[in-house]
Amino acid sequence: MRGGLIELASTGMWVPEKVLTNADLERMVDTTDEWITERTGIKERRIAGDDMTAVEMGYRAGKAAVADAGLEPADVDAIIVSTATPDRLLPATACDIQARLEARDAVAFDVWGACSGWLYAINIGSGLILSEQAETVLCVATEKMSAIVDWTDRATCVLFGDAAGATVLRRSGGNGHGILSTYMRSDGTLAELLYRSPLDSGSVPVDVAELAVRDGYLRMAGREVFKNAVRSMCEAVDAVLEKAGVTKDEIDLLVPHQANIRIIEATARYAGLSMDRVWVNVDRYGNTSSATIPVALHEAREAGRIEEGSLVLMVTFGAGLTWAGMLIRW
Amino acid sequence: MADIESRVRDIIVTELGVEPSKVTPEASFVEDLGADSLDTVELVMAFEEEFGIEIPDEDAEKMETVGDAIKYLTEKEGA
């Protein structure tokens, strides 16, 4: 096995045009712009229409990332997709995206890591390259959260939005650029804090007879999730920095999972990073599950906040519970 | 080390950004000190950090006033 580092050679994103503002939500459920803003920091989110699929969203983000890397889809050896909102359960969303891309020589499969899924996908993709099973890996996160939130539940429907993001992984050109350290964890004993209830008509037998509601919607215990989110992302910050032998002062930008500004602020505070070194776009997109980090990376690059040599720390947290961190020298 | 009551008061003043004089035992976090639902979670997290304990959500929900918190944490510390 050759050593060396893996780099994120590109980024790409796609979001629907339709904007759903807090004012729009005031007309749908019993809520107010002030309530949503104070508790979440979210002002608006993007919503894909009925005619837009998770596959199409992921394809568009993936195609953009392949082009940004200066490659053609035929150059891709592996496509790893993270989604909590597949259009269908078989085949993998990655296979449908592979077909759209016409990336014929690739292996394609999905990763179920909820909001942490994109960092999981990158870590698996890095492993494929380091073990010489692939040279070019496309990692896509595509999340049509509007399809799985209960639009009558004011506690959850205000939080989520739709987006897709992607990156191409390749061997780094050297000079210490690339993924410096990674940390991944899960705790399945806390699964009930955040889950999507099964459908009675679902094709997957699920042993959760005690669940009263089987409506296919997302359910969340907000307070407990908040606490666990802050704690586990701080743990991920410490773990990746220690593995890489890097101090907090050296971090140029923290790109955290965008679920809630209060979680981001609390994480930054406990982790000892000032907010001027934290990328925030939750105000414009809400929580787009595993798509938040690739979209944030893409926007931070476009805004000039990530440049060659920047030390970027990503941390995430989601259903599972799952959490992860990754440190990159861009 | 300061006594439990003053440590609890200090945390409340810092977390909620309120005047120390308003942090009386009868003061309700939500009604009198202007805390919202997430402020109370952050407050509980700060208590957990300070006292090195785990406060289950069902206990946290019963902590409505400054006095409730002081009583709860005093009992926990004594245990």
Image (cartoon, rainbow, N blue to C red):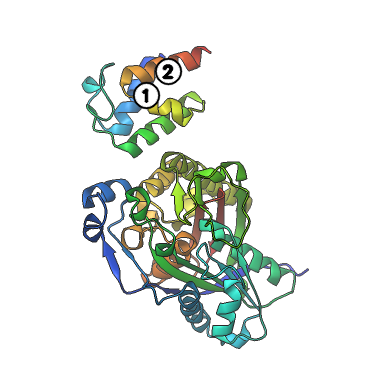
Q: Amino acid at mark 2?
A: Tyr
Residue at x 69%, y 72% (from the top left corner): A129
State how many labels appear: 2
- The image quarter containing residue A302 is bottom left
Q: CA distance from mark 2 to mark 1?
A: 8 Å
Residue B5 placement (x, y as % from top left)? 37, 15
- The image quarter containing residue A44 is bottom left
Q: Is residue A62 left or right of residue B43?
A: right
Which label's residue is closer to the chain start, 2 or 1?
A: 1
Q: Is residue B40 left or right of residue A306?
A: left
Crowd rating for badge 2 (residues with CA inside 10 Å; few <14, some 14–19, many 20+): some
- The reply to whether callout 2 and callout 1 are in contact (CB within 8 Å) is yes
Q: Mark 1 falls on what kind of element? A: loop
Q: Chain of mark 2?
A: B
User: Which residue was labeled with disc 1?
Assistant: B63
Q: Residue A35 versus residue A243: which sits nearer the camera?
A: A35
- The image quarter containing residue B25 is top left
- Farthest residue toward the front? A201
- Farthest residue toward the top? B78
Residue A7 placement (x, y as % from top left)? 59, 70
Vertical placement of residue A56 versus A153, above or below = below
Q: Residue A176 versus residue A220: which sits nearer the camera?
A: A220
| Quadrant occupied by the N terminus of chain A | bottom right
Vertical placement of residue A147 versus A156, above or below = below
Q: Amino acid at mark 1?
A: Met
Vertical placement of residue B46 versus A26, above or below = above
Q: Chain of mark 1?
A: B
User: Which residue was labeled with disc 2?
Assistant: B72
Q: Residue B65 versus residue A144: which sits nearer the camera?
A: A144
